[in-house]
Image (cartoon, helix red, strand yellow):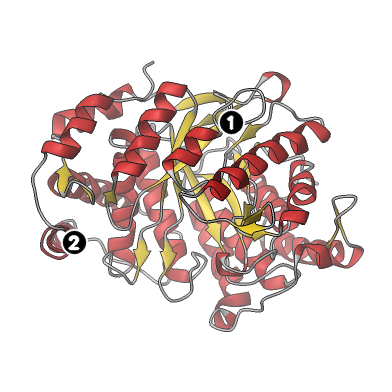
Amino acid sequence: MATPPYRMWDVVERASTGPFCEQQEFLTKILVPKLKEVIEKYGIKYDPHSPIPTQDSLADRVWEAAVELFRDVGIYNQDTHRRITFSDKEILEALSCTAGEYNVGIGKDSKILQHRGVEDRTPPFVIFSPDIIFDEEDFLTACIAYLKEPLLDGFCAPILEESMGMRIQSGTPIELAGSLEHAMSLREAARLVGRPGVFLVAVGTSQSDASQISVSDPEWGVRTTDSRLIGSITELMTNNSMMNKVVHCQQYGCYVANLTGALYGGYAGGAEGTAVLETAYHLNGLMVYQSHYQMNFPYHLKYFSNTTRELLWVVSVYSQAVARHSKLVNVSNGFANAGPGTEMLFFEAAAHSIASTVSGANLWEVAPARNKNKNRATPLEARLAAEVGHAVARSGMTREKANEVVNKLLGKYEDKIADAPLGKEFKECYDARKGIPTEDYVALYEKVKEELFEFGIDFPY
């Protein structure tokens, strides 16, 4: 079965020859009106009582709306002021030719990253990631702590803010130094824990195209069996730097993920528009970014999270739409409000894991403390999310049951979202030298896990 890229140079050409418009015109006169049109045309309506929708027809209508939106709007290149557009035939061709599964990693550490269906009993592929900045001196020990987790199928390391005693700035020599340090330390951590071939998503410290290209090296850096994240610009936009990364990654031969986050409360509007846009991003990933899988983090404009009631509905609906109508590999990234060392973070991680897993997604867990508080992440909340995802899949949990459980979980934390506790830093929750959680943090984890069992999560251990 064919794999990306899909007609890469045809797409690159369209970035310079497609329909011309200015950015504000694209957003306000093309994207927003069309989004409103398809929401009304396909009768898409958010139901706050069902954070996990159970009607297949809703997912089907969201998919149809997303395809029409992507076809008629396309993707806007900020540098060329051109729209990259595709026909229905081309969309169907690309969907038909995608593989649906990939063998990632090396040797004994290799795994299958694959498409999942709604209520699929195959456990999700779980990428552990703190999604947050860590101090340079804690980077290696944090990586070791994460890579020791048995349910980890892949790993995306913390982000470095400083290197060589200087603050990293994109497009400067210090970014090259920080990216090199990130890549080498990550490979060292994997070898130290006995998982040298583990699937790595790297390197988050590297923002510019030149910096990403600089870490492509099978000996010490990103290998062809690893993955890159190439971000879309909210909403449905790209630029030449992003496209440079696309071309380089395909020519180098590594796996590619399109990193997307439709913004609830922005141009997407409410839950309905956010779900349609996040679904449409999968077509952008397939056809423009030439990606092998999609990394999704739709999030709330006010809270910078996706564990609110509205966003869990978005996560569930777009995942079901993609699962039912394609072979695309969907990875769902959790963004929580609370920080480590709190019950609330565990409940949020569990809710996001349930909504994603039962709806057909793989997991990327978990960004605590609204993804913006330094050093505030640990492997333990990711472990809980992974264990919940495995339990949901292996027990054959239905969407009806998942809806019941998630409503109970929302009852535990929903009223605390606006003032979510910041929690503790990594070193307050972990023995950094050994890479293990403190007794107090393990006790809290076990307490929450017992509550989840009482809610209906059938853990195997």
**Looking at this view, is 348 or 341 the one in front?**
341
The N terminus lies in which quarter of the figure? top left
For label 1, count other residues whose C-alpha is less than 10 Å away and answer few (under 14), some (14-19) or many (20+).
Answer: many
Residue 186 sits in quarter: top right
Q: Determine which of the numbered discs, if any, sits on residue 384 in the image.
A: none
Q: Amino acid at mark 2?
A: Leu
For label 2, count other residues whose C-alpha is less than 10 Å away and answer few (under 14), some (14-19) or many (20+).
Answer: some
Q: Position of residue 171 (x, y in %)?
A: 45, 49
Determine whether, in the image, residue 84 is placed left or right of residue 351.
Answer: left
Residue picked out by circle 2? 27
For label 1, the SS is loop
Residue at 76% in and 47% down? 140
How many numbered marks, from 0 up?
2
Disc number lying in front (2 or 1): 1
Residue at 49% in and 50% down? 172
Residue at 41% in and 29% down? 248
Q: Earlier in the sequence, mark 2 or mark 1?
A: 2
In this picture, is 127 found above or below 451?
above
Q: Position of residue 274 (x, y in %)?
A: 32, 61
Residue 257 sits in quarter: top left
Determine whether, in the image, residue 391 is placed left or right of residue 278.
Answer: right
Q: Is residue 90 visible?
A: yes
For label 2, the SS is helix
Q: Position of residue 82 (x, y in %)?
A: 15, 46
Residue at 55% in and 57% down? 334
**Looking at this view, is 168 or 251 the one in front?**
168
Q: Position of residue 325 (x, y in %)?
A: 32, 37
Residue picked out by circle 1? 222
- C-alpha span from label 2 to label 1: 35 Å
